[in-house]
Image: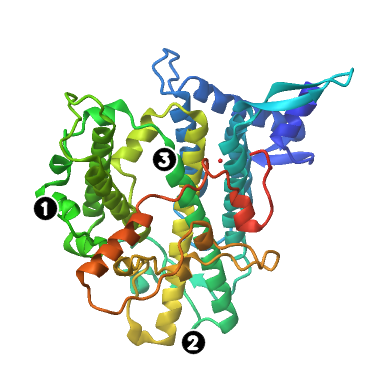
């Protein structure tokens, strides 16, 4: 019986033999090989990646996070082409990610339940169920993962899109920083209308996956505790963290995030990340100053709480804009510190799984943009190079509203034509265009609008909303990432 259960969990195909790492094994040998592989993986997790057994390994949360990240790196690598995954690689990914996610089945919480005894008496007892954030978000992330794999599978029979061979690489090599990525080729007259519409649909689908994974990841990181090591490394006031120039801009009487970002040097990934690190540090400092009750505390401040809250709202508005305008930048110092010192295993799994899905979706979307760019050049060579994800236009900051609605349109599925869009779900409505010149009243109005965007929407654990319901129309378990 135990053996039967083990075989079922391993999901070994019911065939007489199977190839593993080039070796043809019988079904019995295949089961043993899978079990040995699973034992090795979970042994590393139990040892905290310290194979000496000396107890100097990392925490279980970080070990699981690293295991999921490393598994994704080995399975997907860098997606250079729009093509299906190899069957063996896909099977390995699904099998091993199931192993790692199975830990969440045993992370439970107590909930009240009613039980009827034999004599008809109804008693209220406490029973266990899977933790609500995991019960909601793990199925949602699995669905997003499947959507990405299905998107790549759909390119299997695509005949209008191909890539340059090694012989042609010198003539048509990319001229940007991704020179090793193959250049896509389309017919001389460009893609057909049908293929172009299909490709746009795939881009919208992947963009939905990216936005949803980004939202889940942001919420999980927000809920992680700020490590003491990070707090101890901070200066004692926001001015020291931001610098005089940025501090004056954020604390000025009239604040316009659009004007503020226009004065910042965002020409490189390093400078964007540096600005994000500075602002996140100042937010933590201001929060601690607001919660410091002892006037003699090192974190206490003479500035009123109302102003401190206003400064924090402005800083978080800038962080939200940066997150959506530059989705591909690396993690900030605060995020890295949270992941490294986090002890909540459930949060570690949600964060790492959503992060790799977000990264894969962004990569696939970039490859689709490459094909669209090649198609544009085929139709009109005078267009020249077209930037993917233009830095300055992805958000309409000057209006106080997000103008990238087309990029966050919901999947138009035949099965769920009336499902909500992610734009509706996150509460990002459209605003009227303001065509008049900026006056003091308008700036105040923009500042008020910016406050509405100052904090990431409470998407996951506080609202108890199912991503599956919003993405696909199918409801996840009602009991409630």
Position of 175 with respect to 218 (left or right) is left
Q: CA distance from mark 3 to mark 2?
A: 47 Å
Q: Which residue is mark 2?
A: 189
Quadrant holding the C terminus: top right
Disc 3 designates what residue?
221
* Left or right: 114 in relation to 161: right
- Foreground mark, 3 or 2? 3
Please identify the quarter of the rendering in which residue 397 is found: bottom left
Of tags 1 and 3, the one toward the viewer is 1
Q: Whole-Å distance between the Cαs marked 1 and 2?
A: 52 Å
Figure check: 233 above or below 149: above
Disc assigned to residue 105: none
Q: According to the image, label 1 marks what residue?
A: 245
Residue 217 spot, x, y in % from top left:
46, 45
- Structural crowding at the residue carrying mark 2, measured as other residues with C-alpha within 10 Å and reported as few (<14), some (14–19) or many (≥20): few
Q: CA distance from mark 1 to mark 3?
A: 29 Å
Residue 453 visible from this viewpoint: no
Which element is circle 2 on? loop
Image spot of residue 6 (x, y percent): 73, 27
Q: Is residue 425 above or below residue 110?
A: below
Q: Residues within 10 Å of mark 1 (few under 14, many from 20)?
A: few
On the rendered image, what quadrant is the N terminus found in?
Answer: top right
Find out whether the residues at labels 1 and 2 contact each other: C-beta distance under 8 Å.
no
Seen from the viewer's position, the closer of residues 59 and 290 is 290
Please report the residue visible at 69 percent of the width from the left and 53 percent of the height from the top: 474
User: What is the number of callouts on the image?
Assistant: 3
Left or right: 161, with 11 as reference point: left
Disc with the residue nearer the chain's start (1 vs 2): 2
């Amino acid at each position: 019986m135990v053996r039967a259960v083990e075989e079922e969990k391993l999901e070994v195909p019911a065939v007489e033999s199977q190839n593993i790492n080039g070796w043809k094994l019988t079904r019995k040998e295949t089961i043993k090989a899978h079990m040995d592989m699973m034992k090795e993986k979970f042994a590393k997790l139990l040892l905290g990646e310290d194979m000496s057994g000396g107890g100097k390994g990392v925490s279980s949360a970080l070990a699981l996070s690293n295991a999921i990240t490393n598994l994704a790196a080995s399975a997907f690598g860098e997606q250079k082409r729009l093509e299906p995954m190899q069957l063996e690689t896909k099977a390995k990914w699904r099998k091993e990610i199931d192993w790692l996610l199975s830990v969440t089945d045993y992370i439970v919480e107590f909930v009240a339940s009613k039980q009827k005894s034999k004599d008809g008496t109804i008693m209220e007892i406490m029973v266990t169920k899977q933790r609500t954030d995991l019960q909601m978000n793990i199925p949602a992330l699995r669905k997003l993962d499947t959507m990405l794999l299905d998107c790549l599978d759909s390119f299997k029979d695509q005949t209008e899109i191909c890539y340059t061979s090694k012989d042609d690489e010198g003539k048509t090599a990319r001229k940007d920083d991704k020179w090793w990525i193959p250049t896509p080729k389309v017919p001389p007259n460009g893609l057909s209308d049908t293929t172009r519409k299909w490709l746009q649909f795939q881009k919208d689908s992947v963009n939905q996956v990216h936005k949803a994974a980004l939202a889940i990841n942001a919420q999980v990181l927000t809920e992680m505790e700020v490590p003491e090591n990070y707090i101890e490394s901070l200066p004692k006031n926001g001015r020291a963290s931001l610098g005089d120039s940025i501090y004056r801009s954020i604390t000025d009487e009239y604040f316009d995030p659009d004007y503020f970002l226009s004065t910042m040097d965002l020409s490189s990934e390093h400078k964007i990340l540096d600005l994000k690190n500075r602002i996140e540090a100042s937010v933590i400092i201001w929060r601690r100053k607001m919660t410091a009750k002892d006037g003699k505390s090192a974190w206490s401040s003479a500035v009123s709480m109302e102003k401190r809250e206003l400064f924090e709202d402005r800083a978080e508005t800038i962080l939200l804009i940066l997150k959506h305008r530059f989705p591909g930048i690396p993690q900030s110092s605060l995020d890295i510190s949270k992941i490294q010192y986090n002890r909540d295993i459930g949060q570690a799994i949600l964060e790492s799984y959503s992060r790799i899905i977000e990264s894969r979706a962004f990569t696939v979307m970039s490859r689709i943009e490459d094909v669209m760019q090649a198609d544009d050049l085929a139709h009109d060579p005078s267009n020249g190079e077209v930037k993917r994800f233009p830095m300055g236009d992805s958000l309409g900051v000057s209006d106080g509203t997000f103008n990238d609605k087309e990029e966050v349109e919901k999947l138009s599925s035949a099965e769920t034509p009336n499902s909500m869009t992610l734009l509706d779900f996150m509460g990002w409505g459209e605003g009227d265009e303001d065509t008049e010149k900026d006056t003091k009243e308008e700036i105040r109005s923009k500042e008020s609008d910016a406050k509405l965007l100052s904090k990431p929407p409470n998407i996951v654990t506080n609202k108890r909303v199912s991503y599956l319901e919003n993405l696909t129309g199918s409801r996840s378990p009602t009991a409630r990432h």
